Amino acid sequence: MAYPGYGGYGGAMPGMPHQGMPPQGMPGGPMGGHMGGPMPGHMGGPMGGPPPQGGYAPYGGGYPGTYGAPPPPANDPMWGYFTAIAGQDGEIDAEELQKCLTQSGFTGSYTPFSLDTCRIMIAMLDRDYTGKMGFNEFKNLFTALNGWKQNFMMFDQDRSGTVEPHEMSQAINAMGYRVSPQALNAIIKRYNKAGRVYFDDYVACCVKLRALTDNFRQRDTMQQGSVTFQYDDFILCTMAI
């Protein structure tokens, strides 16, 4: 395989600090300082690391697990934010997530996330295909979003909310994904608008790359960069994202 490496799932780009980008004004109080201050708890933790040479990073890309985890501690600041927006079932759907991200001001001056992007954010972590996410998945998502936002802002120097296609390619490579020039070109054509990649589309691309690579990795037990899919399994892996 010409491009055997797989992605570090939103790891910070070289030279970027390992700290969270704070959503502003979420229910329950502020979540860190302005544009770059550290976030409480798990929100400002490291974003994994680069994949080892000749292969890809350990499964999950450094994100904490979801299933079998102990109940959230009473002093976990994220628990208050989660319960403020979760439905009566104790989970968050795409509409609730979109409302949370919009009201929190997470995107700052960038265009708020579309409902479609929020849907695939949930699908990325939705192991049981309920279309919703629980508390641990909620924390995992914000960890990923923080890293992706830092990466995007590294290229969006003028804070226009867009990056150029070649910068998008650099960001994908910097996150540890090793794909062919043809694949990169297809990704750029899919996610650019009038020659620019907007933040919402950038995050949607990052979500899909992580989710599809997760699905592939689970089946690539020998880490050879090659798997055999049954048709129904392929449809499940791709159409759910």
Image: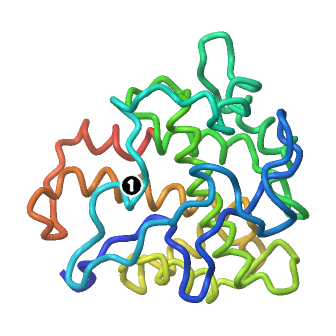
Give the SS element for disc 1.
helix
Scheme of image coloration: rainbow
| Residue at point 27%, 56% (across, down) | 216
Question: Extreme left residue here?
Answer: 222
| Residue at point 64%, 87% (across, down) | 167
Does 129 sit above or below residue 19? above
Say which of 199 and 45 sits in front: 45
Say which of 19 and 196 sits in front: 19
List x then y, in percent, for residue 105: 86, 51
Instruction: Look at label 1 and name its amino acid.
Output: Leu
List x then y, in percent, for residue 169: 55, 83
| Residue at point 76%, 25% (across, down) | 84
Identify the image quadrant of residue 153: bottom right
Does 119 sit above or below residue 85? below
Identify the image quadrant of residue 227: bottom left
Question: Extreme top residue here?
Answer: 88
Q: How many marks?
A: 1
Q: Is residue 116 left or right of residue 62?
A: right
Q: Is residue 33 left or right of residue 13?
A: right
List x then y, in percent, for residue 62: 39, 60
Q: Quadrant of the N terminus?
A: bottom left
Does 196 sit above or below residue 223? below
Q: Which residue is mark 1?
A: 212
| Residue at point 46%, 62% (across, down) | 209
Label 1 Cα crowd, 10 Å radius (few <14 / some 14-19 / many 20+): some
Say which of 35 and 166 sits in front: 35
List x then y, in percent, for residue 100: 78, 37
Q: Is residue 76 left or right of residue 183?
A: right
